Amino acid sequence: MTDIQLQSTITCPQCNQKTIEQMPTDYCQYFWECPHCKNKLKPKKGDCCVYCSYGSVKCPPIQKGEC
């Protein structure tokens, strides 16, 4: 089994700024606010969280195969 990555870079679709975030290990994060433009993100249809939709790395539950 591979190691679980806990950091993901979220790219805001509105302002295209990138932010490195520490992901929670025990739940999927449904909302996220861009610190640059204050755009509020939620997952795209079919994704469990903002990291799966906009991040460089899928969330820990997906990496573990739990979602």
Image (spheres, rainbow, N blue to C red):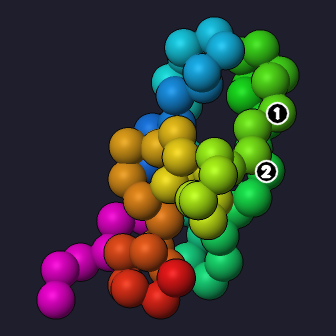
Residue at the spot 82% in from the left edge and 33% down from the top edge? 40
Instruction: Specify few, some or many for label 1: CA neighbours under 10 Å numbering under 14, 14-19, or 20 or more.
Output: few
Q: Earlier in the sequence, mark 2 or mark 1?
A: 2
Q: Which of 36 and 49 lies nearest the eye of the viewer?
A: 49
Q: Inspect the image, locate mark 2, and give the three-letter code of the amino acid beneath it.
A: Phe
**Outermost residue toward the top?**
15
Farthest residue to the front: give it.
45
- Which residue is the site of mark 1? 40
User: What residue type is disc 1 on?
Assistant: Lys
- State how far apart marks 2 and 1 are (Cα): 7 Å
User: What range of the chain is rendered magenta?
Assistant: 1-6
- Label 2 close to label 1 by CB (< 8 Å): yes
Please determine whether, in this image, residue 20 is positioned above or below residue 62.
Answer: above
| Residue appearing at x 38%, y 85% in the figure | 65
Instruction: Residue at 42% x, 59% y: name it.
Output: 58
Tell me if residue 22 comes above or below residue 27 in the rendering. Answer: above
